Image (spheres, rainbow, N blue to C red):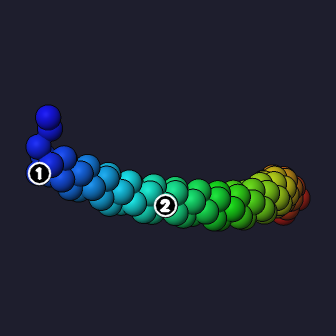
C-alpha cells in the first residue's frame, strides 16, 4: 500500500509545481505584454519618423525647385550681361573708329 505521507508529500509537490508554473506563466504574460507595448511604441516612433522624413523631403523639393528657378534666372541675367558686354565692346570699337 502507498504511504499516506508519500501521498501528502506528492500533493504538496503537485501544489508547489502548480504554483511554480502559475508564477512563471504570469511572468511570461507580463513579459509578453511589455514586449507588445515596446513593439507598439517602436511602430509609433517609426511612423512619426516617416512623417518627419516626408516633411523634410517635401521641404527639400521646394528648396530645390527654388534653387533651379533662381539658377535659371541667374543664367538669364548672365547671358544678358554677356550680350551687353559684347554690345559695349562693339560700341567702343565704333567710337574709336569714328574719332581716331
Which disc, if any, is residue 50?
Answer: none
- Residue 86 in view of the camera: yes
Residue at left 52%, top 57%?
Answer: 36
Which disc, if any, is residue 33?
Answer: 2
Q: In which quadrant will I find the C terminus?
A: bottom right
Q: Quadrant of residue 40?
A: bottom right
Residue 46 at x, y = what percent?
A: 58, 57
- Residues at circles 2 and 1 in contact by the CB criterion of under 8 Å: no
Residue at left 36%, top 57%?
Answer: 22
Dot 2, crowdedness within 10 Å: few (<14), some or many (≥20)? few
Of residues 26 and 6, the one nearer the viewer is 6
Residue at left 15%, top 49%?
Answer: 4
Which disc, if any, is residue 5?
Answer: 1
Q: Quadrant of residue 64?
A: bottom right
- Residue 93 in view of the camera: no
In primary-sequence order, the first of circles 2 and 1 is 1
Of residues 42 and 27, the one nearer the viewer is 27
Residue 41 at x, y = what percent?
A: 54, 64
Left or right, residue 9 beside residue 51 = left
Q: In which quadrant will I find the N terminus?
A: top left
Between marks 2 and 1 in the image, the one whose residue lies nearer the viewer: 1
Residue 98 at x, y = what percent?
A: 88, 59
**How far apart are the two marked residues, 2 and 1, measured between alpha carbons?**
41 Å
Left or right, residue 41 beside residue 55 = left
Amino acid at each position: 500500500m502507498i504511504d499516506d505521507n508519500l501521498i501528502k508529500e506528492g500533493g504538496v509537490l503537485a501544489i508547489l509545481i502548480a504554483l511554480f508554473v502559475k508564477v512563471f506563466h504570469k511572468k511570461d504574460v507580463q513579459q509578453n505584454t511589455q514586449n507588445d507595448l515596446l513593439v507598439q511604441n517602436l511602430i509609433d516612433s517609426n511612423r512619426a519618423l516617416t512623417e518627419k522624413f516626408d516633411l523634410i523631403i517635401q521641404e527639400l523639393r521646394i528648396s530645390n525647385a527654388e534653387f533651379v528657378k533662381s539658377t535659371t534666372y541667374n543664367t538669364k541675367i548672365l547671358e544678358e550681361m554677356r550680350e551687353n558686354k559684347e554690345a559695349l565692346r562693339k560700341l567702343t570699337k565704333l567710337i574709336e573708329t569714328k574719332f581716331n
